[in-house]
Structures are given as C-alpha cells and as structure tokens.
Image: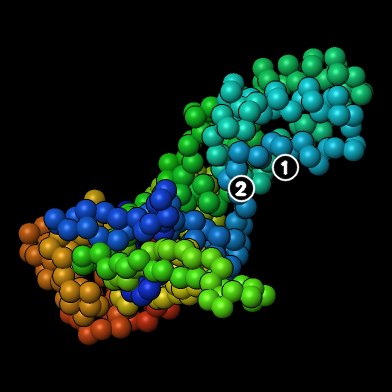
Amino acid sequence: MTEPRFLQIHTLSQYTGVLLNRDDTGQAKRLPYGGVSRTRISSQCLKRHWRVADDRHALDRIDGAEAAFRSRELVTKKVVEPLRGRFPDEVLKVLEPEIQQAVYGEKGTTRQNRQTLLFGSLEIAWLAREAERMAGEAGGKPDAAKKAVAAWRKTFHHNIRAMRNAATLPAGLTAALFGRMVTSDFDANIAAAVHVAHAFTVHREEAESDYFTAVDDLSDDASGADTIQETELTSGLFYGYVVVDLPGLLKNLGADADMATAADMAGSVLHNLVYLIAEVSPGAKLGSTAPYGRASLMLLESGDRQPRTLAEAYRTACAPDAQVAADAMARYLYLLDDAYGTGEERHVMTLVPVDIPRAEHGTLADLATWAKTLPGAFR
C-alpha cells in the first residue's frame, strides 16, 4: 500500500428553516459565489461543533487524547484560582501578572489585550505546578515571590519548550488536529493537520425574515404579545470540504518518537472524524429550529497529489436538490479525472443514486473503517 498524503472529505448536507451560523448583525453568514449570494457556515463554526460534540464518536473518547482549553482566562481560572486560600493573596498578586505575561505576552495583564489561546491540559498542569512551587518558596512574602517569578520568567520559554518536547500531546488533541497560533511564543505554534473549508449552499440563498412574539401568560393585555422580535431563517443544501494532511497529523501526534502509537491514534481520529462530519450539525437557535441533519452524501478520497476542492461543480448555482447536486459532483469528477488522472482511491456513502467515478459504495461505517486504515501505510 502506497503512502497516501491526503484524505479529502466531501459532503452534501441539507437543513431547513434554520440559522446555522450568524454574523455580527445576527443574520446568516453569506458568501458571493458564481454571481449569486449563498448561505455560508464558517470553518470555525464547523470545527467547534466537531471538537465539543458530546457523541459516541467524540474526539475526547479516543484513547490517549488529551484535553485542551481555549480561553483568555487560562492563567486566572486554571492556574491562580486553585491556589487561593492556600497561599496569601499578596503573593498571588505578585505571581499572577508575571505568569499572564509569560503566557499571553507583555500586554497580557489585562483580559481585553489577551489572545484567546488554546492550551493543553499538560501545559496547564505544568504552569499550575510552577505557580504552586513559586508560591510555596515565597513563604508568604511578596518580595520573595518577586524574586522567584523573575527568575522563572528568564527560563520560562526554555523550560516549557522542554516540557512540550517530552510530551506526546502537550497542547491536546484539538491543537494536533486544528493547529494553534501563539503570538507571544513562536515555538508554541502548531500547523493544522485538518484543513476545513467554509461550507456554502450549492444554490442561491434561501432566506426569510421570521417575525415572532413571546406571550406573557400573566398579562391582562388581550393581545397577549409581550415581546415582538424578528430573526432570519434559511434553508439550504451545503457543500462541505475537509482535507486531512496525513503526514502532518502523524507528526502532530508524536510520530517522530513512536510511529506505531501515532498511527493507531491517527486511525482512531480519522474514524471518529468521518462520523462527526457526517452526523454532527452546526447550529444556533437549537430550541426553536432543531437544526439537526445528516449528510446526504459523503465522498472520501485518498491520494498523494495536492488536494482540490469540488466547489467548482457548484459555481453555477444548481437546484437545491441532493440528486441534482450529486450528479453535478460526479460530472465534475469525470472532467478532473480525464484532465489530471491523479488516481485517488474513492469511497462514497449516498442517499441518492449517483455514479461517482471509480468510487466504492458503502455505509458510513464502511467509510469510517476504511479511513481508519490509512495511517497504517506509514508504519
């Protein structure tokens, strides 16, 4: 089996009467494409729902997965607050701003100036141990705390780098998959192994303004309408596209130290990710729209050439129909194969009959099981 460099995941997913992803005005996000406006779901929205899904295929259920937290309050909530009541406040007031600056940069003493960072549980545990050590060494004296933390700041980057190098997933599984940027510490940056495109409707946007009221059960007003509001609802068939850089994923999972273990974890990640992409819905307004759906089509491709989106199949907006969209995808793939002949291996799960060139048809379980085998080629 040759080493596949990339796994590409294409989906067609339908939602009706929903508001999946809102912009700063509370309206549905949009994207102009092919001369018409489409409804859009941002990659950040998609990734978050896959990351935090409470699901039997949740990423945090994978053996060896380490948790991670994305926040401006990492030091406050996870490092300093557990020490309150155990050490004098005067000592913690000295330590906290120095640790904030070490993690978030020189302007990190104020919340609004901090970057929303992703830190793994191992990194946070290390910071917490260091803070506890310095607080203990201070012996209740603020001046001693100043000396301890000043010495710590001088070696911070070297020591946290050594800790990260010694751990398989110091920044957690989330960072290994979706990457991390830390502006205050270049060495902490992690290149994303999973690349997620913004999903968009294959057709012109379908939206309406939804006028609604809230009724006051105890009001004497005969109309009963206490609150009058307006929101937007959309319907759409979305094309989604995800690429997994397999060597990059293995590297982020510790392949340099132990390829066999990294390949096992990567297989579990791909298996669960296939399920999450097909079954976990993004969505706001859960209580009033029930925005739950599953992919009408999922196509998996593996190969050793640069990936390519199939979005061009929908540059000319098509009918909002899964059959029409699936046929358009198939036609475009035939054109790509004739022109480039890159020979990707394909597996497809579909609710509509479609002839995807050189694709083996199967269930979602079949696709997930096949994806799980791909990292084994690197052993």
Would you say the residues marked 2 and 1 are in contact, meaning their CB atoms lie under 8 Å apart? yes
Identify the element where label 1 is drawn: helix
Which quarter of the rendered picture does the N terminus lie within? bottom left
- Quick one: 169 or 373, which is closer to the camera? 169
**Left or right of residue 134, residue 312 in this image:** left
Residue 214 lies in quadrant:
bottom right
**312 sits left or right of 100 in the view:** left
Amino acid on which the number 1 mark rests in the picture: Lys
What's the residue at 84%, 25% (across, down)? 91
Specify whether residue 102 is in view. no
Residue at image position (83%, 37%) is 83
Asked which colour scheme the image uses, the reply is rainbow
Name the quadrant containing residue 367: bottom left
Point 53% across, 72% down: residue: 225
Q: How many discs mark residues in the rendered view?
A: 2
- Whether residue 26 is visible here, answered yes or no, is yes
Q: Is residue 240 left or right of residue 155?
A: left
Q: Nearer the viewer, residue 317 or 309?
A: 317
Q: What quarter of the picture does the C terminus occupy?
A: bottom left
Marking on residue 78: 1
Residue drawn at x 35%, y 55% is 29
Q: CA distance from mark 2 to mark 1?
A: 10 Å
Q: Amino acid at mark 2?
A: Phe
Task: Where is residue 252? Give x, y as percent.
Answer: 48, 46
- Judging depth in this view, the residue of 95 and 204 nearest the camera is 204
Residue bearing mark 2 = 69
Q: What x and y, as percent, mark residue 283? A: 46, 65
